[in-house]
Image (cartoon, grey):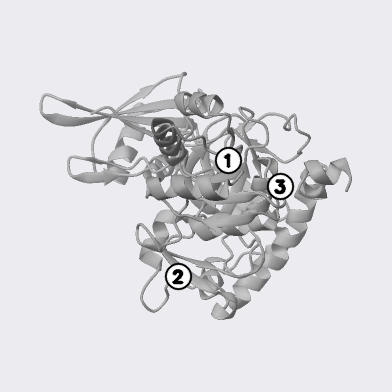
Amino acid sequence: MSAFVEYYFDHLETQPNDEREANLFEQLPHLLTHVAQTSPYYRQALAGIEFGGISNRQALTQLPVLRKSDLMSLQTDDSVLAGIEPSFDEIDRLFVSPGPICEPESNQEDWWRMGRAFHAAGFEAGDRVQNCFSYHMTPGGLMMDSGARACGCVVIPAGPGSTEQQLAVNARLRPRGYCGTPSFLKILIDKAKACGQSLSFEVALVSGEAVTEPLKQAFAEAGIRVHQAYATADLGLIAYESEPGQGLVVAEHILVEVLRPGSGEPVAEGEVGEVVVTNFNLEYPLIRFATGDLSSVLPQASLCGRTNVRLRGWQGRADQSTKVKGLFVHPQQLEQIRRRHPELTKLRLIVTHEGGNDKMLLRCQHSGAGFDASAIAETLKAVTKLSGEVISTTDIADDGVVIEDRR
């Protein structure tokens, strides 16, 4: 086996990025045609769009964004997957995650595409892996299970909790690898230390939570090399850590955009926005699926040689909706205001509570021509049904925050 094959999961990880983009956009019209013909939801959502013209990232903005929050209302007893799946023939499992939101799974090998995250984290064929993600109701356990097995690992389906039993399994089977949440790994480290036990873990793939600096220090002191994976129950793997502290490399076979919260428009490189993903999964295709997570694109490729785009990591939630005087205000409404006034380039709504009353201040960054605070205030009231002060500014940060609730 060559050193190249040992270091990378496959040749796709090092292909030129423009070649990767060209391949994905060559496939996209075929995917759109297929789902429009076979999926009831997409037949309606994509009506009237010329698929052949969706050949680059700018053209992607013609396609509607499907928000994770929309799935709860779209999924019904008669259509548990919202009519998105072309056919139930290839679906083997159904999960119900908090929300509640249903997610499907197919038994195809590494259907969630997690294998390359395990490979980049240093898992090797023959390793035993203690999988501490839940196998109950949500897909996390089986998602990680399939990824570890795609690397040739032997999986111990431990699930979460039961720390004493977990330590007993670790002592008996001596797994080299751990996968689960970072907080549970810390619990196991602390419990083992209190019991005078030496954990067998050398490598770990963690997900579901942020890895804080104190956690990183604890893992390093325990001698465990920890990598992160960014995945969701709907999409599977989105991005993974190949070099600690160097961001997350976007997975193959998906298109990732970073959009202004509440809109379908991309932000500039380095600016924080909502992570939106298009997968090419014929069993459960998700086109421009808004995850609700905030992140930003890092410049240049990873030092490890993988050429795909890198995300900085989780930087907050895009759903910044808040209630003002009994009415909800949403990021989408701020985007409506921005679109009605072409001179506006960026908005931030500040919500405060003064003298027993909620107050709104709309800070506006603009191109300099035609700024009319009174007209914008009227639009603000028309869209939100609430009054607020409007001011001009030049210093709105590129942090993805559209609504800042200071109460």
Residue position marked by numbered label 2 in the rendering: 82
Q: Do labels 1 and 3 touch, CB within 8 Å?
A: no
Quick one: 394 or 89, which is closer to the camera? 89
Q: Residue at x 54, y 78 (%)?
A: 88
User: Residue 24's spot in the image, x, y percent?
Assistant: 74, 55
* Vertical order, 153 against 49 (above or below): above
* Vertical order, 397 against 97 (above or below): above
Residue position marked by numbered label 1 in the rendering: 204
Circle 2 Cα neighbour tier, 10 Å, few/some/many (<14 / 14–19 / ≥20): many
Looking at the rendered structure, the kind of residue marked 1 is: Ala
Say whether disc 3 or disc 2 marks the residue closer to the N-terminus.
2
Going by the image, does 59 lie left or right of 168?
A: right
State the CA–CA distance, disc 1 to disc 3.
Answer: 12 Å
Say whether disc 1 or disc 3 marks the residue closer to the N-terminus.
3
Is residue 167 visible in this depiction of the protein? Answer: yes
Q: Residue at x 41, y 62 (%)?
A: 136
Image disc number at residue 104? none
Looking at the rendered structure, the kind of residue marked 2 is: Ala
Q: Quarter of the image containing the C terminus?
A: top left
Residue position marked by numbered label 3 in the rendering: 124
Q: Residue at x 49, y 31 (%)?
A: 343
